[in-house]
Image (cartoon, rainbow, N blue to C red):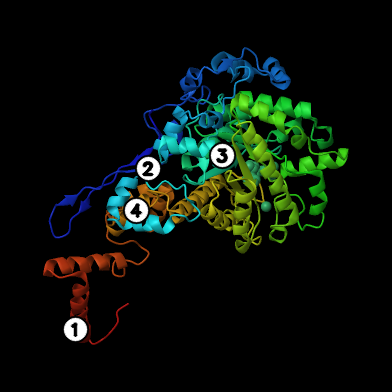
Amino acid sequence: VAVAMREIALTDTALHGKKGATEKNAPVTVYDTSGPYTDPNVTIDVKKGLSPLREKWIIDRADTEQLQQVSSSYGLERLNNEKLDAFRFEHLRKPRRAKSGANVSQMHYAKKGIITPEMEYIAIRENQRYDLLKEQLNGSYDMLAQQHAGHSFGANTPKNYITPEFVRQEVAAGRAIIPSNINHPESEPMIIGRNFLVKINANIGNSAVTSSIEEEVEKAVWACRWGADTIMDLSTGKNIHETREWIIRNSPVPIGTVPIYQALEKVNGKAEELTWELFRDTLIEQAEQGVDYFTIHAGVLLRYIPWTAKRVTGIVSRGGSIMAKWCLAHHKENFLYTHFEEICEIMKAYDVAFSLGDGLRPGSLADANDAAQFGELETLGELTKIAWKHDVQTMIEGPGHVPMHLIKENMEKQLKHCDEAPFYTLGPLTTDIAPGYDHITSAIGAAMIGWFGTAMLCYVTPKEHLGLPNKKDVKDGVITYKIAAHAADLAKGHPGAQYRDNALSKARFEFRWEDQFNLSLDPDTAREFHDETLPADGAKVAHFCSMCGPNFCSMKITQDVRQYAEDKGLQEADALQKGMEEKAKEFAEKGSQLYL
Ligand code: IRN
Ligand code: FE2
C-alpha cells in the first residue's frame, strides 16, 4: 500500500571552523492529512472529486453490492429534482451496501481476526520516525518511554512500531475506531484511539444565514490542508444534501455529521414533528452518500431533562436540545434510544461509526460535571455495549466547558462507564471570560484531556459563541488544536512524536531559518512574522532575528562559546570559564561600562 505522508526536505548544516564543510540533515517525514491537494503533481477537479483509493479493497472483500437506486425516499426525491444528483449518478459512483446479512464494519473484521488493508495503511501511517528519534536521543529515549509507560497510555502502549496486528487488536477491543464508510472510498484510512496519535476534528457547514456550497467545500479542503484529521459537516440551511455530497467527494479525511439536523430541516424546524421513520430515512440517505460517522444524541433520556432546569446555561447542544424538545412534547422516551438496535443495523451495513452525542454537556463552568452530564455519560456507556454487540464502531462525545481541576474526572468516568471506547471532546473550554479567544481557552483543556487519554479533540475557533467561522478562523482553530494534540502526544510518550520538535530545535539553533519555517505547523505565518522586520534574503541565513538583535541572541552566544572551545581545544564548561575571564578582563579595561 502507498501511504500518505509529507516529507520536509532540510538544508545542510554548515560546520564551523571548516570552511565550506557541511553536514547533511535527513528529511523529516510527518503525518499528513491534506490528501492530494498539496501535491504539486496532482491537479484536482472539484466537480469530479478525488480518486477512490479504497474502492478496490471494498470490492475485493466481496461482501457488498452496488445499488441501482438510492434507498431513501428523500434521496429519491432529490434524484428526480436536483441536477446535482443526476450528475452524481452519471459521473460518480453508485452507492454500495452490505449484502443481505453481512456486516462490513472494520470492528467486525477485526473481531474475526482479519487485518484489512485499512489497518495496514494505518500502521504505516502512525509510525513516525521512532527509529531516528531513538538515534537522535542517544538511548535517553528508552528512559523517556519507561517514565511514560503505564501513564495514560496504559499497558497497551506499543514500545516501538505500531503493527497492523496491534491496530486490529485495538479495533477489536473497541479501544479505537477506523471511520470508513464503504461509500467514502476517497478517504485515506485513519484511526481514532488513545494508543495512537491524538486526532483533531474541524467543524464546517453553512448555517441558514450564510455561505455557499463552494465556500463550504473550500473550507473542508482548507481544514485538511492545515491538519484536520476529520471534518464534521454541520450544515443546517438549504442544500444540505448537495453541500454534503461535494464535501464527501472531495474529502481525503472521514466526514462526520449530526443527522438530526437534516431531519429537523425536513420537518421545517418543528422538533415535535420528528419521527423515527423520517430519521431512519435520513440515516440511510447520508450513509449512502458516504458519511463516516454519525453523532447520535441517544443518551438524552426523558428523566435527565429536569436535571438541566437549574443549570446556568441549560442544554447547549443543538442535537441535545432538539431531542429534549421532542421528549417533552410527546412525554416519551427519546426515539434514538428506543430504536438504538435498529440504528446499529443501518450502521453496520455501511460501516458508519457512532459518535454518541453529549446532548447534556455543560455549556458553562458552573454546569460542569453535574448530574445531568454524568447521567447521560452512563447511558452512553450502556449504548456502547449494545453497539459493540453489533460490531459497530463507537466513540463517545464529551464536554464542553470544564475548569482545569475538573477535567481529569471526565476522562476517568468516561473510561470506566464506556469500557475504554475512544473519547472525543469539544475542548473543553477552561474559562468563560474570553469570547473571541475561545480557541485558546479550549485548547488548554484539550491539551490536558488529550494527555489524560482523549483520542480526538473537536476544535473550537475564535468565532465560537460569536458567529460562523470564516477561512481564517478555520485555520486558526485547526493550528491551535494541532498544538494541543501534539503537546498531548509528547506528554503521552507516543513513539516518535518528538522527532519533529528536535529537528526544528536543531534548525533554530543553527539559524537554518527556511528549515525552521518548513518544519513548523504553519510555515506561512512563521515566515511572515520573521520577514515583517527582516525581509531581506540575507536575513534567512543571519545568525539572529529582530527579537534580540545580533548582540543579544543567546543561541548565537552559545555557538560562539562552542566555537571558542573548539578553537582552543577546550571542553564547553572550561571554555565558558575561560571566556568569562577574558570578557571580564576586556570589560574592566573598558572601564566597567555597559553599552546598551
Ligand atoms: C464533540 C464533542 N462533543 C460535541 N462535539 C461536537 O459538537 C459534535 O461532534 C458536533 O460536531 C458539534 C455540535 O454538536 P451538538 O451541539 O449538536 O451536540
Ligand atoms: Fe460553549
Distance from the alpha carbon under mark 4 to that under mark 2: 23 Å
For mark 4, does the 10 Å Cα neighbourhood hold few (<14), some (14 to 19), or many (20 or more) residues? many
Q: Tell me the SS state at disc 1.
A: helix
Q: Do the residues labelled 4 and 1 touch (CB within 8 Å)?
A: no
What residue would you read off at disc 2? 161
* Ligand 1 within 8 Å, label 2 CB: no
Amino acid type for the residue under numbered disc 4: Leu
Q: Do the residues labelled 1 and 2 touch (CB within 8 Å)?
A: no
* Ligand 1 within 8 Å, label 4 CB: no
Outermost residue toward the front in this view: 112
Q: Point out the tag, 3 or 2, that comes first from the N-terminus.
A: 2
Q: Do the residues labelled 4 and 2 touch (CB within 8 Å)?
A: no
What residue would you read off at disc 3? 174
Q: Residue 504 carries which label?
A: 4
212 left or right of 543? right
Which quadrant of the view contains residue 128?
A: top left
Nearer to us: label 3 or label 1:
3
Amino acid type for the residue under numbered disc 2: Tyr
* Ligand 1 within 8 Å, label 3 CB: no
What residue would you read off at disc 1? 585
Q: Point out the tag, 3 or 4, that comes first from the N-terminus.
A: 3
Nearer to us: label 4 or label 1:
4
For mark 1, does the 10 Å Cα neighbourhood hold few (<14), some (14 to 19), or many (20 or more) residues? few
Amino acid type for the residue under numbered disc 1: Lys
| Picture coordinates of residue 97, whole percent (x, y) | 60, 20
